[in-house]
Amino acid sequence: MPREIYPVVVKTTAIEQITNGQPLLYKELFQKSNHLKEAGALLRLTTEDKEYLATGYFGKQEKGLGWLLSTDELQDIDETFFKEKIEVALDRRNDFFENDLIDTFRVFNGSGDGIGGLTIDCFDHHYLITFENEGIYSFKQDIVSALESLIHFKSIYEKRAFQIDGQPVKGDDFLAGERGDFPEVLQENGLPLLYHLDAGMRTGLDIQQRELRSIVKEHAANRRVLNLFSDTGTLTASALLGGATETTSVDFSTRSRNKTIEQLELHQLDPATQTILVQDAFDYIDQADKKTRFDFVIVHPPALVKTQARHFRAEVDLTALIQQTIHMTHRGGLLLVTTDCPLFDQVRFMKMVDQAFKKLRQTYDIVWESTPLPDFPEHPSLKEVALKSVLVRRK
């Protein structure tokens, strides 16, 4: 069945953005968009005079109506198109494929590699395709076929990070190859880590935190470490392997506790000797008394929390949260703050950290500041979506 093609007129004020390759398509760029209905339909973007500008696809996400694919009017959006894009991305990751110390990395990073809404990760030759909206999912057959033709793989899995009629999309994640016997173990700079690809949306291993694990391990020696919003505990394990004297991990989910125990046992570390709390980290912070102090505090809050009990938006509330964690850090101690909020960039993030210290009339030194990971390229107009992190020493 032929794919629907919608003509879309771009506002005069937005023409330059489109011709310059602005990847994210949002309704403010168009004269009208209420005629767009079918997820995955192609968008033929034109001027008012019907002059061709670009081709995109319709796929609603939290931000935007879809993504730009090409500024070549003769370009067919088919398996060949996806194969060419993925092949270029694979070539950019040659250093990772040849690095025996790193088994996991991002192979394709959305608009940074030319197709917004699509990511592909490598976990020791098990590949994970994440479809971030229903529109890109409609190209699944072409994308999977293209990937299969380009790589040697143990298996290919998928994750569907979108909802239909307000409900998560359910179904088998396995696509091709031989199913993994999960949880499996891979290596990251000599650090064994557990991961799952057949347990719903969560893999148990955030590969964007690769540098964070190295930094924590490097600076944890002889320190009492607090890991807030600890998730699967890979940073806790890194701290202990780096010589931390003790750790406290706080996360609201029982799953987090269980995964943290798994990670520690993998390294022959006794979970019973560590504090692993199933508690809302925000509550833990609010309830901490003046004696609750650590030598190294790690805080990685979610970008958004909206419940009856709590509303937290990183772009508004992160500065206040950092202030609270400063109080929990000994003088001379370390504070690692990290966020994946897509609404501000590293520059604004650093201003938030600085503002938090200034409001408390405190001073600090920057020990380490994150830079873009080579396997997570971002389009120049979307730098704010990258993971943002800083390690500071409270004076």
Image: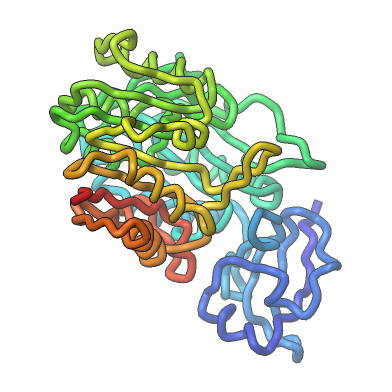
Question: Which color scheme is applied?
Answer: rainbow
Residue 114 visible in image: no
Q: From the viewer's perspective, tell me whether residue 95 is left or right of residue 302.
A: left
User: In which image quadrant can residue 239 be found?
Assistant: top left
Quick one: 45 or 348, which is closer to the camera? Answer: 348
Q: Residue shown at 36%/66% (left/top)? A: 347
**Image x and y of residue 377, in percent:** 39, 58
**Image x and y of residue 94, in percent:** 28, 48
Q: From the viewer's perspective, tell me whether residue 88 is left or right of residue 12.
A: left
Q: From the viewer's perspective, tell me whether residue 36 is left or right of residue 392.
A: right
Q: Residue shown at 34%/24% (left/top)? A: 248
Residue 96 visible in image: yes
Quick one: 10 or 64, which is closer to the camera? Answer: 64
Above or below, 168 against 65 in this view is: above
User: In which image quadrant can residue 237 be found?
Assistant: top left
Q: Residue lying furthest front in this view?
A: 290
Q: Residue shown at 23%/23% (left/top)? A: 240
Above or below, 26 against 181 in this view is: below
Q: Residue shown at 39%/32% (left/top)? A: 289
